[in-house]
Image (tube, rainbow, N blue to C red):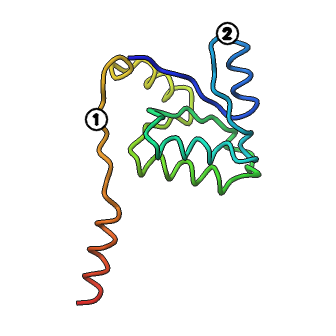
Amino acid sequence: MNHFLSGTGTTARLISEKTELPVRAYNSGPLGGDQQIGCRIVEGNIDFVIFFWDPLESQPHDPDVKALLRIAAVYDIPIANNRATADFLITSRYMNEEYERKVINFNKIMHDRLNEMTK
């Protein structure tokens, strides 16, 4: 199984420069890059996310960051927010074999809740 690297703006450039690996670059996070990655998750083109940020600093694009985290949770995408978790993901046996994600059918859940409310 092969993996391809993607990243937003400066992150993609830095990873490519430091590793000499090809990296698919999206827009900078504040300019929609987080949303572009979220879209790729929905399309089934991203297997896991490593997303580091400074937890002591406010993010100018905080709503976009939360949307990315939300879509990763909805689509059962592993997401690392620190180096320890990233190390666990990268060294996981699932890096070299298929993993079947279990995506919850939220449409059905919402439909069932509406039916319960109208009874």
Which quarter of the picture shows residue 25? top right
Q: Tag on residue 20?
A: 2
**Which residue does the image show at 34% across and 23% down from the upper left?**
94
Is 51 placed above or below 13 here? below
Lateral position of residue 51 relative to residue 107, left or right: right
Q: Residues within 10 Å of mark 2 (few under 14, many from 20)?
A: few
Q: What x and y, as percent, mark residue 23?
A: 63, 22
For label 1, the residue is 100
- Circle 1 sits in a helix, a strand or a loop, which is it? loop
- The Cα atoms of the two marked residues, 1 and 2, are separated by 30 Å
Lateral position of residue 89 relative to residue 100, left or right: right
Q: Sequence order check: which comes first, mark 1 or mark 2?
A: 2
Which quarter of the picture shows residue 24? top right
State the quadrant of the C terminus: bottom left
Q: Tag on residue 6?
A: none
In front here: 31 or 54? 31
Which residue is most to the top? 20
**Which residue does the image show at 68% across and 53% down from the upper left?**
62
Check if mark 1's residue and mark 2's residue have beta carbons within 8 Å: no
The amino acid type, in three-letter code, at marker 2 is: Glu
State the quadrant of the N terminus: top left
Is 30 placed above or below 86 here? below
